[in-house]
Image (tube, coloured by chain):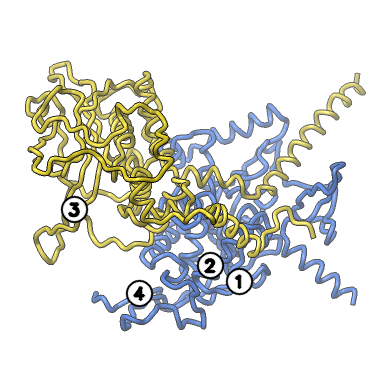
Chain colours: A blue, B yellow
Amino acid sequence: MNTNEIYTRSEPASVVGGRSAGSGMYDVVHEDAEHRPYANQAGAVACEVGYNFAYLDEQTKRMIRRGLLKAVAVPGYQVPFGGREMPLPYGWGTGGMQLTAAILGADDVLKVIDQGADDTTNAVSIRRFFARTAGVKTTTRTPEATVIQTRHRIPETPLTNDQIMVYQVPIPEPLRFIEPSETETRTMHALEDYGVMHVKLYEDIATFGHIATSYAYPVTVDERYVMDPSPIPKFDNPKLHMSPALMLFGAGREKRLYAVPPFTRVVSLDFDDHPFAIQSWDECCAFCGSRESYLDELIIDDAGSKRFVCSDTDYCMQRRDAEEEGAQ
Amino acid sequence: MYVAVKGGERAIDNAHLLQAKLRRGDTRIPELSVDQVREQMPLAVARVMSEGSLYDPQLAALAIKQAAGDLMEAIFLLRAYRTTLPRFTASTPLDTTQMQLSRRISATFKDLPGGQLLGPTFDYSHRLLDFALLAEGEHPGPQVNPDAELSDCPRVLEFLAEENLMAREVDDGVAVPDITREPLDFPASRAQRLQALARGDEGFLLALGYSTQRGYGRNHPFAGEIRIGELEIWLEPEELGFAVPLGDIEVTECEMVNQFVGGKGIDAQFTRGYGLAFGYAERKAMGMALVDRSLRAAEYAEELEGPAQQEEFVLMHCDNVEAAGFVSHLKLPHYVDFQSELELIRKLRKQEREQPAAEEQRA
């Protein structure tokens, strides 16, 4: 290949899963040396000069997409990938950011949430990173987003098959806190040797009377791999089951990625006499009155009085808007 | 509306401006220049280059200035920049016997070809604060003999290897993997291990090396040779077919002589641990050599009894950019998960309160 040829994508990110695939993922385009790739695509102009579209170079993105294809082909299996150093600290979403960078196309609309909220500092920071390096449209409204990067929550608004969820994962290995060695846990996955996990849950019941895992609650994907759904509250686990959206998980520091393809069975581990149950509150959201959503507890005065509000800020806003419209 | 962590771009921007102000300090004092950092804090620059895996004293000095002297932050800055650089090619292997030495010592022989060359060092200095440095002035340095010539300095451990007293290191010819491009897998090759240790945190390696000296996986080290100096880097471009020099870099190399192996019909031999770091970085190179040797325990069929011998433990935790990132992420909001823990612990407490009451009623 001569040096004036560059690889570019002919379609917005349509690599995996339920979104429209282009005729060819990459076309070799002959360009003059001055031409900046992506500068004219769909009006999206990367604002940050000197970096490639969505920061990562195309070779790296391609390497990540190959990993994602494997992850989709083997649901719940942790695929090692050559994770890069990102300009944000490890542990702050570098894995999710690399996946987002790898799948983002110029036409995508990005939503970033942390704790369910669009306005938490790290969500603001990551959203701004992609607005600056990819020039993509961003939104806070779940139905408008094509890619949603998240930390610790799945939106309350049901997802569609036009959407991809990208999860930030700190520790991808569900067995890690039982067996610290990676060599051992990889063997356990290969042999489907998950007895220790059930023993751990049983010990919880013996000690506390309940399974004492309330977030990052382990699931079995497609009746094969036990997977860490990332530190989402177990409240969100049922949303993974048979979801029409593609779910991608990225762990940057640990250099692993994995996926749950659309319409895949995802079952939370439990026992017949101790069935899986999600959190519930006696209170409703102080703003929108929802009794169905995950609630955050706020301490509102020195006496320790409490108030509960939706953790999903967009969902809460949608409900309040609808209420207002109804009232008019 | 109350939001526990109200972000907003303005808040973040202001935080950055405040940080910049903190870095600058009192503006009545002249600003520190990058050249000053590079020339007058060479050991900090060396550490940032080593653990940042990028030999560029100017950028390392810039990173130190930008990080307000926080070396881990500076290392992180340099790493994040390094990631964006294209890889042209790999140099030919460094030949450290060709080093322009500024310092070379061996603790295993009183004298040896090439001699002991003390060079610049803190060793043997009495650690008394030098109040003269409070005043700025010229520091003329020692008298030098312009005609002095360095004689050849063959490697100390090579003499032992000639006598078959030191295990030889053999190049297996396998392509060297790049741990910054391919994820580490276990068991790791020695090339992968040395790369990880070269990037590893000096303090962590120092502590682990120290732990082997105190008995957690003891391997009886002697500082066989430490050499510091300038070294030419050569490249062999494919289209050229021969190597060309690219420039000089300063490195510190340490070879440890360690306890011998053998017995049962095999001649006893010393073993070695190896450390290499950019710039003047003796402590780092020594720590690295100690840990390299202890990670070779399995190779020499030694019992694994200390943390420094556990490959996964050492390699997965020696990187300070990873460690600092994951520890600092605890500062991010976690209130959703905390809420689920609160809900659970309240449920458990409620159940405990109600159970004895129910039992009393039955009684």
For badge 3, the amino acid type reads Ile
Q: CA distance from mark 4 to mark 2?
A: 21 Å
Name the residue: 63% across, 52% down: A152
For disc 4, the marked residue is A7
Q: Amino acid at mark 4?
A: Tyr
The amino acid on which the numbered mark 1 sits, given as a three-letter code, is: Thr
Q: Gap in Å between the C-alphas at discs 2 and 3?
A: 38 Å
Query: Where does the N terminus of chain B fall, quadrant-wise?
Result: bottom right
Residue under numbered circle 1: A138
Q: Are marks 4 and 1 on the same chain?
A: yes
Name the chain letter of the residue that bears numbered label 3: B
Q: Is there CB contact under 8 Å for labels 3 and 4? A: no
Protein chain holding label 4: A
Q: Residues within 10 Å of mark 3 (few under 14, many from 20)?
A: some
| Left or right: residue B363 compared with residue A279 | right
Q: Which mark is residue B318?
A: none
Q: Residue at x 24, y 47 (%)?
A: B250
- What secondary structure is marked by label 1? strand
Residue A319 sits in which quadrant?
Answer: bottom right
Q: Is residue B159 above or below residue A147?
A: above
